[in-house]
Amino acid sequence: MRFGLLGTGYWAAETHAAALVAAPGTTLAGVWGRDPAKAAAVADRYGIRPYGDVDELIAAVDAVAIALPPQVQAPLAARAARAGKHLFLDKPLALTVEAADEVVAAVDATGVGSVVFFTSRFNPPAVNFLREAAATGGWDGGRATLLGSVGGTPYDASPWRHEYGGLWDVGPHALSLLIPVLGPIAGLSAALGPHQTATALLTHTSGAVSTMTLSLASPVTTWDVSFYGTSGWGSVPPVTDAVAAAVVALEALTAGDRSCDVHFARDVTAVLVRAAADLVPR
């Protein structure tokens, strides 16, 4: 499967591109970015062609991998799907339900494959944990505490992360792990605390209750997703190799696995939109 990479930032160059080179059955054929100089640098690094026109790249490949801000990703993903190209996307799929629905409609109309790369969901140890936890059952609830700071990291130069915060950046990771074990979200409430910390209380269709505590501006760093109930306590193993997780996600795409497709990502977007509405000062 020949891929075109849309995006030239740190995540695109260090994770998407590296995984496309490493994954069996995929070839990185070209790159397009909003900054031609950065596209040329990524192309030179990986020995591929830089494209100045995104539609030209889309036309030349079988699939696209998109590592761009969500408000840029969604329309490009719909455009590529309408052109019959498979989609390897990043989270969140979009910042509005309407934009997410546009991608879903394009995928459904053409029948192309799609995987949204919720990094934690494709971490091999986490894959095994989630499979066993779902099969075991007996979980009364869960908690996801994802705290950190983008300051001084490669993501500090990402305006959308600063604007939308932890809810939208790490919230998708939390939901991608809570939902497979506890079930879809039935209701929620959320509040904003110090250090731009978003905390949400979630009720699931199973009757379980979970919490998410999320920030990109926290003075402490914590990554913990745990479940509790009659089965005891269980914690999801953290990601240690994002490229390896991306390879697993690419294998899911080529195998036609739909468990983390644009439909799932659209539902995650809908939950985030509902939570964001509670964070608006009244």
Image (cartoon, rainbow, N blue to C red):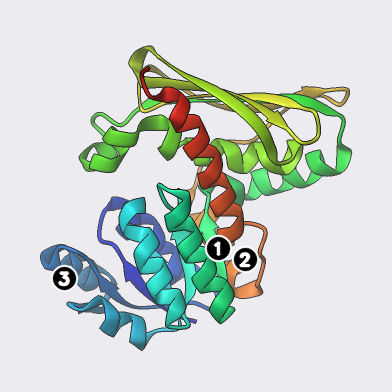
Spot occupied by residue 80 in the image (x, y as percentages of width and height): 40, 75
Residue pointed to by mark 2: 252
**Marker disc for residue 44:** none
Toward the front, the furthest residue is: 282
Q: Of 97 and 72, which appears nearest the observer?
A: 97
- Residue sitting at x 64%, y 40%: 177
Toward the left, the furthest residue is: 37
Dot 1: what SS? strand
Q: Is residue 74 above or below residue 142?
A: below
Dot 3: what SS? helix
**Is 116 on the left-hand or right-hand side of 20?**
right
**Badge 2 density bin: few <14, some 14–19, many ≥20, Cα 10 Å:** some
Q: Cβ–Cβ below 8 Å for labels 2 and 1? A: yes
Residue pointed to by mark 1: 115
Q: Is residue 212 above or below residue 92?
A: above
Decide if residue 233 is in sight here: no
Q: Earlier in the sequence, mark 1 or mark 3?
A: 3
**Marker disc for residue 40:** 3
Q: In the figure, residue 193 lies in which quadrant?
A: top left
Decide if residue 260 is in sight here: yes
Spot occupied by residue 24 in the image (x, y as percentages of width and height): 55, 74
Spot occupied by residue 33 in the image (x, y as percentages of width and height): 22, 66
